[in-house]
Amino acid sequence: MFEFLINNWLEALSTVIGIWCVWLLIKENVLTFPLGITYSITAVVVLAQVNLYADVVLNLAYIAMNAYGWYFWLYGGGERREADQLTVATTSPLLVWQLLAVTLVGALAMGWLFDNYSAADLAYLDSLTTFASFVAMWMTAQKYLSSWVAWFIIDVIQIGLYSYKGLYFYAFLFFVYLVLAVLGWRAWRKHLREPA
């Protein structure tokens, strides 16, 4: 076990940072975003080593999305701000369908590119979780309650993907994320502000 930890120390560190990051997100603490940037940087290194290129792209995008979320939670949202804090909101059915379409089209396109022009493993499945995560991260930055539902579905798929690739710390991390997604949904639902 000790040798496993030594050989996978960055994955283990990234796992701890990831759990802390989501815990802060559940608590609606804006420090989730700088911690998310740190997690994403470590994940890029780990995932590149096992040829999960779509996940590498995802974590590079997470760096930018965490910066966006950080800004939006501090200054954005206009009418959704109460006591200088962004409130939780719901998504419209039309927006849900639009986000699903973006996810599917993006996943197919990225999967095709990685499948045909790289040595990527599980190109389509990896691309599906990548595009779904792009969408879920945008929803999180907007503080939409349904982001937790998206994260739950992504977490289930990622547990299988990372287990298959032998990334057991990350498989464990996404199991914890699965539990945290349920807790996050319940916590945010208490602070929900319905759209006007």
Image (cartoon, grey):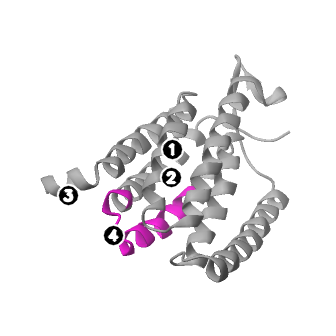
Q: Is residue 12 magenta?
A: no
Tell me the SS state at disc 4.
loop
Can you identify the residue that label 1 sits on?
41
Res. 192 in view: no
Instruction: Quadrant for the N terminus, please.
Output: bottom left
Identify whether 27 is placed above or below 189: above
How many residues crowd mark 3 within 10 Å: few (<14), some (14–19), many (20+)? few
The CA distance from mark 3 to mark 1 is 21 Å
Label 1 with label 2: CB-CB less than 8 Å? yes
Find residue 4 and name its label: 3
The CA distance from mark 1 to mark 2 is 5 Å
Residue 188 % position (x, y): 58, 40
The CA distance from mark 3 to mark 4 is 12 Å
Res. 173 in view: yes
The foreground one among 81 and 14 is 14
Mark 3 or mark 2: name the one nearer the start of the chain: 3
The foreground one among 82 and 11 is 11
Residue at 79% of width from left, 69% of height from top? 101
Quadrant in which residue 190 is drawn: top right
How many residues crowd mark 4 within 10 Å: few (<14), some (14–19), many (20+)? few
Prevailing SS of the magenta stretch:
helix
Name the amino acid type tagged 4: Gly
Find residue 166 and name its label: 4
The foreground one among 90 and 135 is 135
Label 3 with label 2: CB-CB less than 8 Å? no
Mark 1 or mark 4: name the one nearer the start of the chain: 1
Residue at 65% of width from left, 31% of height from top? 70
Can you identify the residue that label 2 sits on?
44
Q: Nearer the viewer, mark 4 or mark 2?
A: 2
Q: Is residue 159 magenta?
A: yes
Label 1 with label 4: CB-CB less than 8 Å? no
The CA distance from mark 3 to mark 2 is 20 Å
